[in-house]
C-alpha cells in the first residue's frame, strides 16, 4: 500500500459532520452499533489519520481519527495521472517501464520468457489531417478498447504517445504465443472499420516484437530492439508483424546510420545529378537524358539511390530531397534548352512525391523559377508507385499531362499492373525494366516478356524504351523486336553535366 503507515483503513463509524471517528480493531463492531446505523456505513471505506490510540485489550485498540479521505483521493488521482495516459486511460510510458523492469527481473530469476510488442497505426497522420483531431482522438480511444480486448488481464497494454501502443506479455511459454497475440491485434483493427462522427475509418497497423531475455535483458536495449522490429515490419509492406533478430539488427543499424547521414546531407547540399543518354534505335540519335541522383555518403563507393531513396522515403525526407532533384534538373534543362533544343530531361518521381497533394503546383513553381519548360521535362513514375493507389495516381498524371509534362512508366513489368488500368494511364512511354533486358539473350521467358511489352506499348500508342542495355546482342534483339529507344552502359554510363555535353559534341549532336 503506497500510503504512510499512520493511515489505517477502516469502516466509518462516526458521522461526517464531526469529522472524527472511533477506531477499533476486532471489537469495533460492538462500539458502532449504538453510534450509527449499520446499513448506512457498513460498506463505506474511508481514510483516517489516527491521533490517539488506546489499547483496550491485548488484541484490540480504540482511538480518534481525522477524516483524510479527500486528501488521499486527490493524491491517488495525481498518482494515477502520472502513470496513465490521459486520452485512453491506459498505462503510460513510465508505468510500462516499471512493469517491464519487474517482468525482466522475474523472467531472469525464474528462467522464463516474456515479450514486448510495439505497434503503431499505419498512416494515422492522414486521419488527423483529413478528418480533424477530435476524430483522431476518438479513434485512438476506440483502438485502445479493441486492443485491450486482445490481451489478458495479467498483460499490460500501454500507450506511449501519438499512435504508438505497447503490449507487455510478462510471461509466455513459447515464442509463438507472441505471434498469436500480434495476429489477434492486427485482426482486431483490420477486420472491422471504425465509425466515428459519421466517418468510416479503416485502420491498419504494423507490429514489432522482441522476446526477453533471449533478445536482451537491458530495458533500453529491448525498447530499441522492438523499435527496429517495427521499422522492419513497415519496410516489409506494413499491416504485418516482424520479430526482432540479430541479422535484422545489423541491417537496420546500417540503415539508421544512412538515415542520420541523409538528414545532415540535405543541410550541406552534398548531392549531385548525373545524366544518362536515351538513344533512338532507328538512327542512334540521343532523344533525351535521365537525371540520376548521386550521393557520396561515406567517402567510399557511392551509395545507389535505389538503396538510400527508400530510406529517405521512410524518414519523411523525400519531399525535400525530391524537390532538390526537380530544382537541379530543371536548372540544367533550362541551360540546355537553347543548346540542345530537343533534349528532354527525365526526372524520377518517388511514390511519396506522386501522392503529394500539391505536386503539380510545386512542379510548376519550380519550372517557372528555373526558367524550364514542362515540354522539356519527362517525369518517370514507377509502375509500382502507380499501383499503390491507381485512381489517385491516374488523376495526378492527367493533371500533369494537361500542364504539358511528358510521362513515362518506369521499371515496367515489375508492378503487375492490369491491362484495363494501363489503357487509362496518360503515359507516352513504357520503360522495360532492366531485369528483363539482361536476360534477353539467355532466358526465353525474359525474351517473351520483352516482346510482349513492346507489342503492348505499341498497341496502346506508347513508345517503348529498354533499360540497362549492355551488349551488342541485346541491342540487336531489341532492334529485331521493334523497340523504339534504349538506355544503358552499351551507349553510355550516367555522366556529369559537362561530360554529357562533351558526349553530345563528340557524337555530333550539338
Ligand atoms: P531507374 O530510374 O530505373 O534508373 C536506371 C538505373 O539503371 C540507374 O541506376 C542507372 O545507373 C542504371 N543503369 C543504366 N544503364 C545500365 C546498364 O546498362 N546496366 C546496369 N546494370 N545498370 C544500368 P541508379 O542511378 O543506381 O538508380 C537506381 C534507381 O534509383 C533508379 O532506377 C530510380 O528508381 C532511383 N533513382 C535514381 N535517381 C533518382 C531520383 O532523383 N529520384 C528518385 N525518386 N529516384 C531516383
Ligand atoms: Mg528512371
Ligand atoms: Mg527503371
Image (cartoon, rainbow, N blue to C red):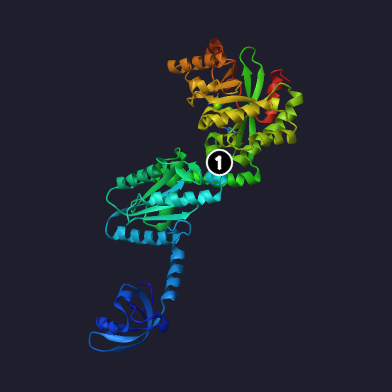
In this view, 327 is above or below 14: above
Quadrant of res 190: top left
Q: Secondary structure at mark 1?
A: helix
Q: Quadrant of ligand 3?
A: top right
In this view, 458 is above or below 383: above
* Crowd around label 1: few <14 · some 14–19 · many ≥20 (10 Å): many
Q: Residue at x 70, y 33 (%)?
A: 364
Q: Residue at x 51, y 32 (%)?
A: 388
Q: Position of residue 425 (x, y in %)?
A: 57, 23
Give the camera-side residue of 336 and 202: 202
- The answer to whether residue 315 shows anywhere in this view is no
Give the camera-side residue of 206 and 138: 138
Quadrant of res 486: top right
Residue designated by label 1? 312
Q: Quadrant of the C terminus?
A: top right
Q: Residue at x 23, y 84 (%)?
A: 59
Is label 1's Cβ within 8 Å of ligand 1?
no
Describe residue 226's horizontal placement relative to residue 255 as left or right: left
Amino acid at each position: 500500500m503506497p500510503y504512510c503507515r499512520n493511515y489505517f483503513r477502516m469502516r466509518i463509524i462516526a458521522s461526517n459532520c464531526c469529522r472524527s471517528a472511533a477506531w477499533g480493531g476486532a471489537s469495533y463492531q460492538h462500539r458502532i452499533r449504538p453510534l450509527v446505523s449499520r446499513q448506512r456505513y457498513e460498506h463505506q471505506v474511508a481514510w483516517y489519520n489516527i491521533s490517539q490510540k488506546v489499547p483496550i485489550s491485548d488484541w484490540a485498540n480504540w482511538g480518534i481519527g481525522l477524516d483524510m479521505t479527500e486528501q488521499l483521493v486527490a493524491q491517488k488521482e495525481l498518482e494515477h495521472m502520472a502513470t496513465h495516459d490521459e486520452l485512453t486511460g491506459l498505462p503510460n510510458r513510465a508505468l510500462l517501464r516499471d512493469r517491464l523492469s519487474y517482468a525482466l527481473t522475474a523472467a531472469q530469476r525464474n528462467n522464463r520468457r516474456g515479450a514486448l510488442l510495439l505497434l503503431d497505426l499505419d498512416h494515422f497522420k492522414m486521419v488527423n489531417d483529413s478528418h480533424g483531431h477530435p476524430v483522431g482522438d476518438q479513434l485512438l480511444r476506440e483502438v485502445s478498447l479493441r486492443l485491450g480486448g486482445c490481451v489478458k488481464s495479467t498483460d499490460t497494454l500501454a500507450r506511449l504517445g501519438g499512435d504508438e501502443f505497447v503490449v507487455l506479455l510478462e510471461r509466455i511459454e513459447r515464442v509463438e504465443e507472441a505471434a498469436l497475440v500480434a495476429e489477434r491485434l492486427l485482426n482486431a483493427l483490420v477486420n472491422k472499420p471504425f465509425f466515428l462522427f459519421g466517418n468510416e475509418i479503416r485502420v491498419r497497423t504494423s507490429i514489432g516484437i522482441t522476446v526477453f531475455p533471449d533478445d536482451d535483458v537491458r530495458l533500453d536495449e529491448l525498447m530499441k530492439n522492438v523499435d527496429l522490429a517495427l521499422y522492419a515490419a513497415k519496410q516489409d509492406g506494413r499491416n504485418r508483424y516482424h520479430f526482432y533478430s540479430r541479422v535484422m539488427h545489423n541491417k537496420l543499424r546500417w540503415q539508421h546510420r544512412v538515415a542520420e547521414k541523409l538528414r545532415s546531407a540535405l543541410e550541406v547540399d552534398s548531392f549531385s545529378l548525373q545524366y544518362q543518354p536515351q538513344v533512338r534505335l532507328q538512327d542512334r540519335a540521343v532523344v533525351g537524358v535521365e537525371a540520376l541522383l548521386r550521393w557520396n555518403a561515406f567517402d567510399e563507393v557511392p551509395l545507389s539511390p535505389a538503396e538510400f531513396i527508400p530510406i529517405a522515403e521512410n524518414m519523411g525526407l523525400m519531399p525535400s530531397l525530391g524537390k532538390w532533384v526537380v530544382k537541379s534538373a530543371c536548372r540544367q534543362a533550362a541551360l540546355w534548352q537553347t543548346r540542345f533544343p530537343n533534349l528532354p530531361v527525365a526526372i524520377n518521381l518517388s511514390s511519396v512525391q506522386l501522392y503529394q497533394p500539391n505536386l503539380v503546383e510545386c512542379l510548376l513553381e519550380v519550372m517557372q523559377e528555373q526558367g524550364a519548360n514542362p515540354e522539356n521535362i519527362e517525369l518517370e513514375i514507377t509502375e509500382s508507385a502507380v499501383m499503390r493507389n491507381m485512381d489517385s495516381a491516374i488523376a495526378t498524371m492527367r493533371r500533369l499531362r494537361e500542364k504539358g509534362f511528358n510521362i513515362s512508366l518506369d521499371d515496367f513489368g515489375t508492378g503487375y499492373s492490369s491491362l484495363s488500368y494501363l489503357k487509362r494511364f496518360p503515359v507516352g512511354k513504357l520503360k522495360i525494366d532492366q531485369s528483363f533486358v539482361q536476360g534477353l539473350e539467355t532466358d526465353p521467358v525474359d525474351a517473351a516478356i520483352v516482346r510482349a511489352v513492346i507489342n503492348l506499348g505499341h498497341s496502346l500508342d506508347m513508345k517503348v524504351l529498354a533499360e540497362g542495355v549492355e551488349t551488342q546482342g541485346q541491342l540487336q534483339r531489341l532492334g529485331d523486336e521493334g523497340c523504339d529507344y534504349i538506355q544503358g552502359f552499351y551507349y553510355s554510363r550516367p555522366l556529369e553535366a559537362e561530360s554529357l555535353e562533351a558526349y553530345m559534341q563528340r557524337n555530333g549532336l550539338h
